[in-house]
C-alpha cells in the first residue's frame, strides 16, 4: 500500500512540474514572439552602438530557435495583438 501512495505522490509532483513548465513555455513563447516582431520592425541604423550590439544578440538568439518554436511564438503574439485590438 505505501508503494502505491508513493507512486501517486510522484505522479502528482510530475504533473505539477509539467504544468509549471508549460506555463513557463507560454511565457517564453510570448517573449520570443514579441522580440521577433520588435527585431523585424527595428531600424538598426538608428540605434546607438551598444543597443545595436544587443539587437544583434537578440536577433541571433531568435534565429537559433527551431522553425516550429518561432512559428509558435509568432502565433502567440499574433493572437495577443488580435485580442488587444
Image: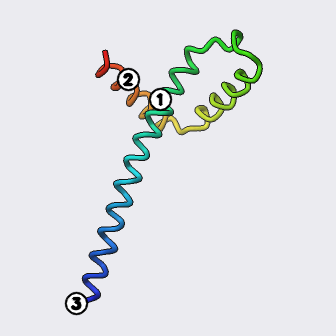
Tag 1 near tag 2, CB within 8 Å: yes
Q: Which residue is drawn at 38% across and 53% down?
A: 20
Which residue is under mark 3?
Answer: 1
Using the rendered view, name the quadrant where residue 81 is placed: top left
Q: Residue at x 27, y 75 (%)?
A: 8
The furthest residue to the left: 1
Q: In this view, does 70 lie above or below 42?
A: below
68 relative to 41 in the view: left or right: left
Rendered location of residue 1, percent (x, y): 22, 90
Tag 1 near tag 3, CB within 8 Å: no
Rendered location of residue 7, percent (x, y): 30, 79
Which residue is under mark 1?
Answer: 33
Quarter of the image with the C terminus in it:
top left
Name the element at disc 1: helix
Q: Nearer the viewer, residue 67 or 30?
A: 30
What crowding class fits label 1: few (fewer than 14 Cα within 10 Å), some (14-19), or many (20 or more)? many
66 relative to 79 in the view: left or right: right
Which residue is under mark 2?
Answer: 78
Amino acid at each position: 500500500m505505501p508503494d502505491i501512495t508513493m507512486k501517486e505522490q510522484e505522479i502528482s509532483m510530475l504533473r505539477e512540474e509539467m504544468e509549471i513548465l508549460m506555463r513557463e513555455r507560454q511565457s517564453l513563447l510570448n517573449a520570443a514572439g514579441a522580440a521577433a516582431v520588435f527585431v523585424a520592425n527595428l531600424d538598426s541604423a538608428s540605434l546607438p552602438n551598444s543597443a545595436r550590439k544587443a539587437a544583434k544578440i537578440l536577433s541571433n538568439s531568435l534565429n537559433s530557435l527551431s522553425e516550429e518554436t518561432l512559428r509558435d511564438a509568432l502565433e502567440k503574439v499574433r493572437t495577443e495583438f488580435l485580442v488587444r485590438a
